Amino acid sequence: MTPKSVEIATDWLVTAGLRPTRQRVALAELLIGDGKHRHVTAESLFESAKKSGSAVSLATVYNTLRAFCDAGVLQEITVDGSKSYFDTNTHDHPHFFWEDEGRLSDAPSEQLVIQQLPNAPEGLEIASVDVVIRLRKVRN
């Protein structure tokens, strides 16, 4: 932890309308303290927190990630219906899911072209479109 990364994390929370508790600041610092975007799972963030010396439980990590999503500062991307990744970049953009590594990364959005979407059923509107492109090594 550096004073600058703590300040970045605290400002991020306050701007989102979240109270900057010790645990929230510690997790926010791991997520955005260096100013870079990242994709994490609750488990990977929990492990990073343990390595950094932060005393947080896995349940606290899950609850905090949910609060961050509800506040709009994280985006949840679900892969396989069972695994959730959390992205600090909340702007619409596509993702690569690296099946062999179980890793999520940003895909180049300037190369993605969606020409037409199906009409939403009556009484509904399309809220968003999530694009996850699954990758795996070529098997011979």
Image (tube, rainbow, N blue to C red):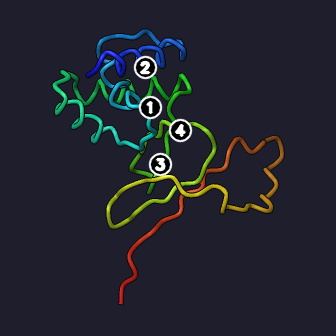
In percent of width and height, residue 87 lies at: 47, 40
**Distance of mark 3 from mark 4, alpha carbons?**
15 Å
Q: Which residue is mark 2?
A: 8
Q: Amino acid at mark 1?
A: Gly
Task: Judge the density around disc 2: few (<14), some (14-19), many (≥20) Cα neighbours within 10 Å.
Answer: some
Earlier in the chain: of badge 3 and badge 1, it is 1
Please report the residue visible at 58 percent of the width from the left and 57 percent of the height from the top.
108
Earlier in the chain: of badge 2 and badge 3, it is 2
Helix, strand or loop for disc 2: helix
The tag on residue 89 is 4
In percent of width and height, residue 104 lies at: 42, 53
Q: Which residue is mark 1?
A: 35
Front of the two marks 2 and 4: 2
**Distance of mark 1 from mark 2, alpha carbons?**
8 Å
Earlier in the chain: of badge 1 and badge 2, it is 2
Q: Amino acid at mark 2?
A: Ile
**Distance of mark 3 from mark 1, alpha carbons?**
24 Å
**Distance of mark 2 from mark 3, alpha carbons?**
27 Å
Task: Name, please, the residue furthest toward the bottom.
Answer: 140
Q: Quadrant of residue 1?
A: top left
Q: Is residue 30 above or below residue 7?
A: below
Q: Is residue 108 left or right of residue 34?
A: right
Q: Which residue is mark 3?
A: 78
In percent of width and height, residue 48 lies at: 24, 36
Helix, strand or loop for disc 3: strand
**Distance of mark 4 from mark 1, alpha carbons?**
11 Å
